[in-house]
Amino acid sequence: MDDYRLIADQVAARIADGRLRPGDRLPPQRRFAREHGIAVSTAARVYGELIRRGLAVGEVGRGTFVRAATADGHVPTEPARVPVDLEINFPLVPEQAALLAESLAGMLRPDVLAATLPPTGASGTTAAREAAAALLSRPGWTPAPARVLFAGNGRQAIAAALVALTSPGDRIGVEELTYPIVKGIAARLGVTLVPLAVDEHGLIPAAIRAAGPLRALYVQPTLHNPLGVTMPDRRRAEIAAILNDLDMHAVEDGIYTFLYEDPTPLAAYAPDRVIYADSLSKRVAPGLTAGFLVTPPALTDRVAAALRSGGWTAQHFALAAATRWLTDGTVARLGDLKRRDAAERQRILRERLDGFSLQADPRAYHCWWRLPKPWRADTFVAAAARRGIAVTPGAAFATTPGQSPNAVRLALAPRLELLAPALETLAALAATAPEDTEIH
C-alpha cells in the first residue's frame, strides 16, 4: 500500500518548513505508530522512506534523526539555521564595512550615481575591464582587458562558461570531489560529470586521457574546494598540453587564488583553451560582488551570449562599485587582511583539532576532516547540528552519488569568537562513539 508514502510526505513537509530541524530525533517507531493510528510495520516503512529520500538517518541503538544534509545533492548555498555555521565559506573581517563605506561615499553624489543607473553589457566598461585584468594578473600571466567579461557573481560566471562550452548529452571531466554548485549546473544543462582521480597535487593528468571522450574540464587548481590542495606548475603545464592535444577546453575556477597568489594560472599555459572564472565574493563579500571571466578570443562571443541569455550579466552599480574598490586599493587591502585572518583561523583549527586527520592549506578558509571510526559523516553532521553547529558532509562534494569519503568540510569563516568553541565541541564529539553521545 502507498499510505506510508503519504505519511512520509507529511513528515517531509515538517522538515521543509522548519518544524523539524536538522538533528531532531524522530519518535520511536511504536510511539509514531500510535500517534498516527498505523501499524508498527507501517511506521517502519515511513522511516525507511524518509531515509531513502535522504531526509533522515538511522543510528543503530539510538533512533532516527532528521538529516542535516538532504542527500548527496546537498549544496551549502544559504546560511544554516544554527548558531555556528561552518558550511558557508564567505569570510568577513571586522574592518571591511568601514573600508567599503569610505570607498563608496563618492558614489552617492547624484551625478555619479546617475551614471550607474542604465544597464551595462557583458563586457562592462573600459575602466572595469582594465581594473579586473590588473586584479587577475599573476606571475607569468597578464590577461588582456579586451578578453574580460562580467557576471553577477562567480557561480554565474562558471554557469556561463559551461553553457558556452557544452550541449545536452556532453561529458565534462571534474575532480572526483568538486564544487557542489557545478553538480547542480550540470544537471540543469543535461550534461554528465565524469569523476577524475586526484592526489596530493590535485587532478591527475593521466585520468583525463583515461576518461574517454570529454567535451570540457572544470578544475580548481588553487586551494581546491574541499581538499585545499594546489597544483604545482609542472602539473598545470602537463594538463595544458593535454588540452591542446585533445582539442579540449577547460573552465578554471580561481575563486581562492587571492589567498595564494604565487601559482601561475592554468590559463597562462593554455590561453586558447581555458576560460578563467573568479569573483569578488570571497575577496569582498557575497552581497557586494561581481564575477569575472577571462576568455580565449575564439570563445568571447559565445561566453558573452551565454551571460546575456542566462540573465547573468553584472549590474551596472555593482560593477561601478567593484571598479572603485579595485582602483582605490580597497580590494588589495581586504586581501591582505583576509590572508592574515585565514592564517590565524588555520592556527586555531590545528590547535583545537590536534590529533585528528586534517587536510588543509595554512592559507585556506576551509579544512577537509577525515572522521575517526566509528563515525559516519551523516551521523556526525546530524550530531553536530544537535549541538548548534552546521558542517558539510563529504557527500556534498562527491561527483559520484553514494561514493563519498567518510569526511566533512569545515568552513572557518564564522565570527572569530565562535570558531574556537565550536571546534572544541566538534573535537569532543569526535572523541566519543556515536552511541555514547547525548540524545536531545
Image (cartoon, helix red, strand yellow):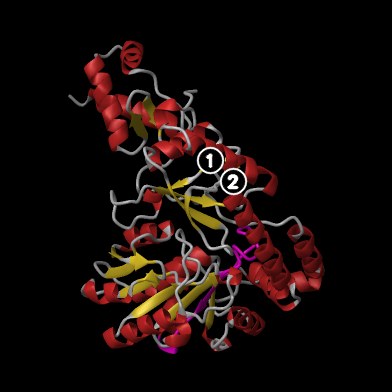
183 is higher (above) or lower (below) than 172 = above
Residue segment shown in magenta:
279-298
Picture coordinates of residue 123, whole percent (x, y) = 55, 80
233 is higher (above) or lower (below) than 201 = below
45 is higher (above) or lower (below) than 299 = above
In the image, 318 versus 63, the foreground residue is 63
| Cα–Cα gap, marks 1 and 2 | 7 Å
Q: Main secondary structure of the magenta part?
A: loop
As drawn, the label of residue 374 is none
Residue 433 painted magenta = no
Picture coordinates of residue 385, whole percent (x, y) = 50, 35
Residue at image position (46%, 66%) is 229
Residue 291 painted magenta = yes
Q: Residues within 10 Å of mark 1 (few under 14, many from 20)?
A: some
Q: Residues within 10 Å of mark 2 (few under 14, many from 20)?
A: many
Q: Identify residue type, mark 2.
A: Arg
Which residue position is annotated with label 1? 427
As drawn, the label of residue 352 is 2
Q: Quadrant of residue 329?
A: bottom right
In the image, 39 versus 241, the foreground residue is 241
Residue at image position (71%, 57%) is 93
Q: Identify residue type, mark 1.
A: Ala
Q: Quadrant of the N terminus?
A: top left
SS type, badge 2: helix
Mark 1 or mark 2: name the one nearer the start of the chain: 2
**Residue 419 seen in the current view:** yes
SS type, badge 1: helix
Residue at image position (63%, 84%) is 130
Picture coordinates of residue 142, whole percent (x, y) = 57, 87
Q: Are marks 1 and 2 in contact (CB under 8 Å)?
A: yes
Q: Is residue 214 left or right of residue 145?
A: left
